[in-house]
Image (cartoon, grey):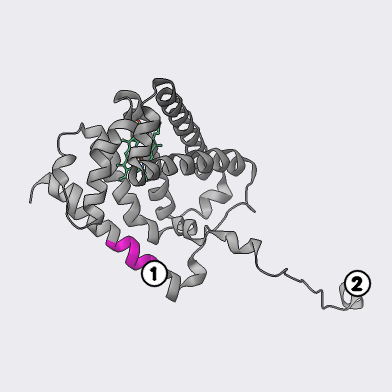
Amino acid sequence: MDWNQLFFVLIPYISVTLFIAVTIYRSIFRPFTVSSLSSQLLERKKLYWGSVPFHYGIVLILLTHLLALIFPKALLLWNAVPIRLYLLEISGLALGLWALAGVVLLIYRRISVAYIRKVTTPMDIVVLLLTLVSIITGVLTAVGYRFGSTWFTGVFTPYLWSILTLQPRPELVAPLPWLIQLHVLNNFILLAVFPFSRLVHILTWPLHYLFRPWQIVIWVRERRQLAE
Ligand code: HEM
């Protein structure tokens, strides 16, 4: 087995297996641990300014990655008109930089606020650093190897489908520059770490709040007791 097979076949499959198996195990057997373990009560201002740009930026970027994976032809059609291609690339870059500013502030918050430092686990640091590397390598790829939204469909759409359909084609990634390879490898490592970290909160999709019955909170203590 060479490096290419290790990085772009073995590690991806280990990551996907861990992601699925541990996430299912955790959801079934330890459901109350599936949480973002919010530290909002300890500090909220820096959290707001870090978390909002980070989440909006990263969610929209991941949606465009998904678009390239599922609807490559539609994306190529969109990119066929230069102004639309520029619009997509510039928006992607702006979102990437926005997410980068957000994650840098979240890391600074973890280091600089004493209360937050106390509740920070080694896994929180690992996740933040992997996310930072993801965003930096993604933005540098977008800047250094332009029009990624187009060449993604020729390289990564077939590569990722080859992994998903159990017919791996690592040779598609082998000739790419190391920066782009690092972006992909780092994201597979992030996938492996996902179920062991607070990132599992992504899967909670808290939309049921919209449909569930009202929560009625009843104050049961006597007024007299409260006055004491
Ligand atoms: C293995 C899956 C992935 C592949 C193959 C991939 C590939 C790419 C490529 C080719 C680009 C350049 C796009 C362009 O120039 O327009 C890019 C950008 C980027 N990626 Fe990924 N990526 C993957 C997963 C992720 C994940 C999981 C994250 C976040 C945690 C991420 C974050 C980013 C960011 C922030 C950018 C910069 C966007 C921009 O500035 O346009 N990527 N990625």
**Closer-to-camera residue (33/176):** 176
For label 1, the SS is helix
Q: Check the image and report above or below for 190 versus 149.
A: below
x, y percentage for residue 96? 44, 33
Q: Which residues are magenta?
A: 17-24
The main secondary structure of the magenta stretch is helix
Q: Answer with the quadrant where ligand 1 appears in the image.
A: top left
Residue matched to label 2: 227
Residue matched to label 1: 24
Asked whether residue 197 appears in the rendered view, the answer is yes
* Residue situated furthest top in the rendering: 83
**Closer-to-camera residue (18/150):** 150
Q: Is residue 213 magenta?
A: no
Asked whether residue 129 appears in the rendered view, the answer is no
Foreground mark, 2 or 1, reads 1
x, y percentage for residue 220? 82, 78
The CA span between labels 2 and 1 is: 48 Å
- What amino acid does circle 1 point to? Ile
- Residue 88, by quadrant, is top left
- What amino acid does circle 2 point to? Ala
Quadrant in which the C terminus is drawn:
bottom right
x, y percentage for residue 219? 82, 74
